[in-house]
Image: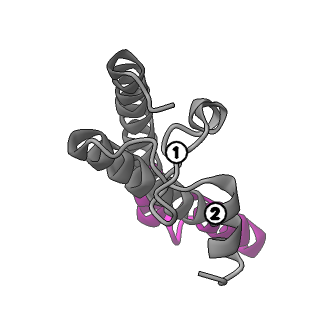
Amino acid sequence: MPLKKNEIQKFKTRLLELRQKITHTLSETQQEVKRQDESTGYSQHQADQGTDDFDRTINLELTQAEMHILRQIDHALEKVEEGTYGICDITQEEIPLRRLEALPYASMTVESQDKFEKGLL
């Protein structure tokens, strides 16, 4: 059964809230990495520098993951505007409501996502 307008609006609100949170987190992470870059060379010991580099690497990896989610959220918001939200990008089947509740930026059914990740699509 297709999503109702009020359900789509509820998901749009959740997506916008998620987008705002991730954007805020990305901004903070970028500022932290910038601060770490500015303090490079001031460590008293080589191990301190290694720890700083490790922290920076972790922050950059988290940033990449968050950027990926942000792209998925933007795609879901585009689907809301197009009127295709809740429809699988691959099979054109409805994405189950429970999946959307758990992952509002899902653009594929579980089966399609699994095949996509295995490189079968």
Q: Which residues are magenta?
A: 32-59
Vertical side of 90 occupied by 72: above or below: above
On residue 119, the disc is none
Q: Is residue 32 visible?
A: yes
**19 or 34: nearer the viewer:** 19
Upstream in sequence: badge 2 or badge 1: 1
- Secondary element type, mark 1: loop
Where, quadrant-wise, is the C terminus in this rendering?
bottom right
Q: Nearer the viewer, residue 49 or 31?
A: 31
Residue that lies at the very extreme toward the top in this rendered image: 6
Farthest front residue in view: 1
Residue picked out by circle 2: 113
The residue that label 1 is drawn on is 94
Q: CA distance from mark 2 to mark 1?
A: 13 Å
In the displayed structure, 106 sits above or below 98; it is: below
Can residue 44 be seen in this snapshot? Answer: no
Task: Where is residue 53? Give x, y as percent.
Answer: 63, 70
Q: Quadrant of residue 58?
A: bottom right
Q: Residue at x 58, y 57 (%)?
A: 62
